[in-house]
Amino acid sequence: MSVYVVNAYDIHDFETFKKYPPQVSLLLKKYGARALAMQTNPESLEDVPKTMNAIIKFASVDDVHRFYNDAEYQKIIGIRHQSTSNCTMIILNQFNQSLAG
């Protein structure tokens, strides 16, 4: 069953951060993941949104962990750590329609 990684963080160094997305997108392809939504400075219905917000679809939780623990990702994760703060990254299971009643 598909899972979704939802991440949000504040970018405080855009110059350094701009090196991150191109490298991450190559790794996402390697794991068959797909960015469903991504936006900086989105419209907020409540509270103050973080600068970057994204939803990434993976085929499985195992694929998420393989991606996150990949040696290539671990080499570039420092770019995100150096250029962002207040990161939240969660895994959500795809909603099972049969549970809706």
Image (spheres, rainbow, N blue to C red):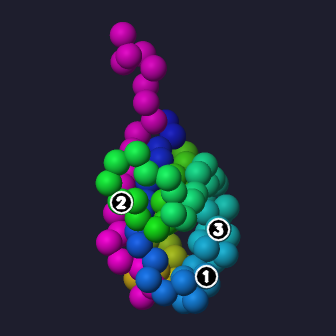
The answer to the question of whether label 3 and label 1 lie on touching residues, with beta carbons closer than 8 A, is: no
- The mark found on residue 18 in the picture is 1
Residue 85 visible in the current orientation: yes
Would you name the residue on which mark 3 appears? 25
Q: Is residue 75 visible?
A: no
Q: Which circle marks residue 48 in the picture?
A: 2
Q: CA distance from mark 3 to mark 1?
A: 12 Å
Instruction: Report the amino acid beneath label 3.
Output: Ser
Quadrant in which the C terminus is drawn: top left
Sooner in the amino-acid sequence: mark 1 or mark 2: 1
Instruction: For mark 1, give the secondary structure.
Output: loop
Measuring from the top left, give residue 24's x and y in whole percent: 59, 72
Disc 3 + disc 2, Cβ < 8 Å: no
Does residue 16 appear to the left or right of 68 in the view shown? Answer: right
Q: What's the residue type where badge 2 is placed? A: Val
| Comes first in the chain, label 3 or label 1 | 1
Q: Position of residue 89 (x, y in %)?
A: 37, 61
Q: Residue at x 40, y 40 (%)?
A: 93
Q: Is residue 3 above or below residue 35?
A: above
Residue found at x 50% / y 52%:
43
Start and end of the magenta stretch? 82-101
Q: Residue furthest top?
A: 101
Secondary structure category for the residue under label 3: helix
CB of mark 1 within 8 Å of CB of mark 2?
no
Q: Nearer the viewer, residue 18 or 24?
A: 18
Where does the image place residue 75, in percent across and percent down from the top left?
A: 50, 85
